[in-house]
Image (cartoon, rainbow, N blue to C red):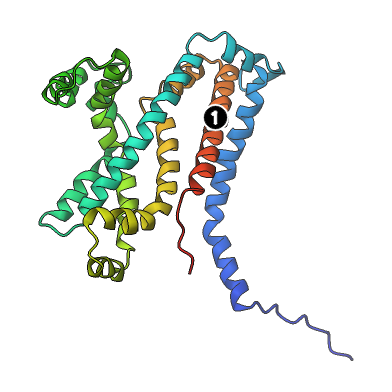
Amino acid sequence: MAEKSRKSPVHLSYQQKKSLYGYGFISLWLVGTVIFFLVPLVKSLAYSFSDVSIGTGHTALKFAGLKKYLYVLGEDEYYTRYLSSTLTETLWKTPLILIFSLFIAVILNQKFKGRALARAVFFLPVIIATGPVYPIITGDIARTGNSGAQQFSTLFSTDLVGGLLQFLGLYGISDSMGSYISGIADNIFGIVWNSGIQIIVFLAGLQNIPPSAREAAQVEGATAWEYFWKITFPFVSPYIVANLIFTVIDSFRSPTNDVMRRIHDMGSDWRFGEASAMAWIYFSIILAAVGLVTFVVNRLIYYEVD
């Protein structure tokens, strides 16, 4: 009798085995993304085009077209105003955060006693930024429900702007410019608080500058100012894009963001259609802002080509 043919075992190459290990490693992440991100994302999009009614054990949807979007943009008395203020705040706060974080990163990249402690102090807000800590420090009574938070926040407030301008001999500044300077001064703590990640990223870029570049600059007699603009800044410029994108997104999802608070309040009132429409409009604006910023800044950034 002829021997039964046996199927030969499947032999995988080393690269195929590595690929299977990789897929196995991210499999839990993929399952979580589908269940906890993609499914709610699709549901929220369906809610934004529907009248949502909550029944016993089920949610009923009735197609309403663009009704929710028209209500949000034309009838809601808070959303457009909050959206405008959030965009304005992001527009002026983002450059300040980038400039401050680069300045601090350059300082922390120097060798001095206590450098590790200084780095830890600036990175500390990243660890405790979540939860109720930031609203308590900034005195956000609406979020904390604690009037004592307002008293605590006075430790970080100052009324020295007018005195400083007078000391510098600056008189007769317009009300708009004065309010702008005061707004920056009042948000100094927020700028420092939101710069932790950016400082770490810039530090990574600064540490990638080859020592030969500094040695060549010293041989040529370059000053510290010339070294910064001709060596340091070009080398860290690719990191500016990453920090810029992170800062914009972080500003849009800030715990003090009135738009996010409005969306949460609408959801708490069981108005899921309106809340979803607000969220999708907000998401579209964030996506457009990040795309525009990336497109513009990438044209101004120096990338070293090997």
Q: How many numbered circles are shown?
A: 1
* Image quadrant in which you'd find residue 180: top left
Q: Quadrant of the N terminus?
A: bottom right
Say which of 55 and 280 sits in front: 280
Q: Is residue 86 left or right of residue 271?
A: left
- Report x, y in % for residue 85: 42, 20
Is residue 166 positioned above or below 241 on the image?
A: above
User: Which residue ends up furthest to the bottom in the rendered image?
Assistant: 1
* Image quadrant in which you'd find residue 86: top left
Q: Residue at x 33, y 57 (%)?
A: 230
Q: Residue at x 15, y 51 (%)?
A: 117
Q: Is residue 278 left or right of residue 90?
A: right
The answer to whether residue 215 of the structure is visible from this angle is yes
- Location of mark 1 (residue): 285
- Number of other residues with Cα within 10 Å of mark 1, as a class: few under 14, some 14 to 19, many 20 or more: some
Q: Residue at x 10, y 57 (%)?
A: 113
- Report x, y in % for residue 135: 28, 25
Is residue 25 positioned above or below 173 on the image?
A: below
Q: Residue at x 59, y 67 (%)?
A: 19
Is residue 286 positioned above or below 221 on the image?
A: above
